Image (cartoon, rainbow, N blue to C red):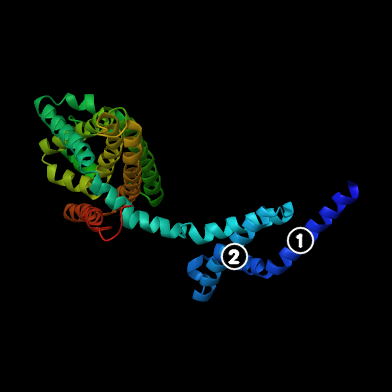
Amino acid sequence: MTVAANTIAEDDAIRSTRFRKEREDGWKRLDTLVTTAEKRGVQGMSYEDTLALASLYRQAMNSLSVARAISMDRALLRYLEALCARAYLVVYAPQESVTGVLGRLFTHGIPQAARRSGTALFIGFLAMMLGAFTGYMLYLQDPAWFFTFVPGGLADGRTPSASTEYLRRTLFDTSTRSSEALGLFASYLFSHNTQVAILTFALGIFVTLPSFILTYYNGLILGAFFAMFAQAGLGYELLGWLSIHGVTELSAICVACAGGAQMGLAVLLPGNRTRRAALRDRGRDAVKLMILAGLMLIVAAFVEGFLRQLVQSTELRLVIGWGLGLMWLAWLLLSGRDGPRS
C-alpha cells in the first residue's frame, strides 16, 4: 500500500508540474496585467492589453476548473483561485477612482436627490418660514417674547431695550475684528451650526415632527430678531446683514430638516413597501441632503466669519448673499439631468 500511495503521489506531482508548465506563461502574463490594472485602472491600459486581460482571465478560469476536477495540489489551486479573484475584480468590478466617485456625487447624486426630495424640502422651508412669521408677530404684540425665544448669549446685548445706535453698530462696527478673531468666530459658527444641522437631521426619523419643531424654533429666533431691528428702523440693514450668510446658512438648516423629514416620511408613509425598504430607499437621498447641508454650512461659516465683517455695504451684502443662493439653486436644478439616477 505504501508503494502504491507513493506512486500515486508521484503521478500527481508529475501531472501538476506538466499542467503548470503548459499554462504558466499565460498566468504570469495575466498576473502582470492585473497588477497594472490595480495600480492604474483599466482606463490606463492599451486596447491590446485590455483584450489580453479578458482572454487570459477566461483561460485562467478554465485552468482553475480543470485543476479542481483532476485534484491538483493545494498550492496550485490556491494560486489560481487568488489570481482569478483578482482578475475578476479588475474585469467586472466598477473601475472608478475616489475622485470619480466624488465628482459623480456632486454632479449627479446630490442634485438628483434634491430634486427627488421636493416634499421634504417643502417641509423644511415651511417650518423655518412659519417660525419666522410667528416670532415676528408675537414680538410686535409684546417685545417680552424676545427673551423667550432668543438665548442671552446669542442676543449679545441686542435686546429690545438697546438703543438704535447700538443696534446699528452691531451690524457695521469692525473696530474690534482682527484676522485672528474672525478666524475663531468662523470656527465657532461652523461648529455650532453643524451641531444644529446634525440634530435636526437625526431627529427626523421620529416621524419628522422633532426636525420640524427644531427648525421652527430657529425661525422664531429669526422672526424676533428681525422685528426688533425693524422697529428700530434698521430692517433693511438687518436684511443685508443676514442675507450675506443667512441665505446659505438658513437654507442649510432647512435642507438638514428635509433630510430628517425623508426618513420620517419613510416611517410614516412607506406606501406599498415595507418601512425597512422605504427607509433604505429614502435614506440614500437623506444622506445626500445632509452632505449638501454640511457643504452649505462650510460656505456659510466662511462668509459669516469673514465676508460679513469685511463687507460693510448693505447692497453688496444683499448681492453676495442672494447671488450665492441663486448659484446653489442653479446647481441643484440643472446639474445631473443628462445622466442615470445616482
Q: Which mark is residue 327?
A: none
Q: Residue at x 75, y 65 (%)?
A: 18
> Looking at the image, is 5 positioned above or below residue 280?
below
- Which residue matches tag 2? 59
> Looking at the image, is 53 positioned above or below residue 327?
below
Residue type pointed to by label 2: Gln
The local secondary structure at tag 2 comes to helix
Q: Nearest the camera: 232 or 186?
A: 186
Q: Earlier in the sequence, mark 2 or mark 1?
A: 1
Foreground: disc 2 or disc 1 = 1
- Which residue matches tag 1? 15
Extreme residue in the right direction: 3
Residue 104 image-quadrant placement: bottom left
> Which class describes the residues within 10 Å of circle 2: few (<14), some (14-19), or many (20+)?
some
- Separation of marks 2 and 1 at Cα, in angstroms: 19 Å
Q: Is residue 147 left or right of residue 295?
A: left
Q: Nearest the camera: 76 or 137?
A: 76
Residue type pointed to by label 1: Arg
> Looking at the image, is 227 positioned above or below residue 67?
above
Q: Residue at x 53, y 66 (%)?
A: 54
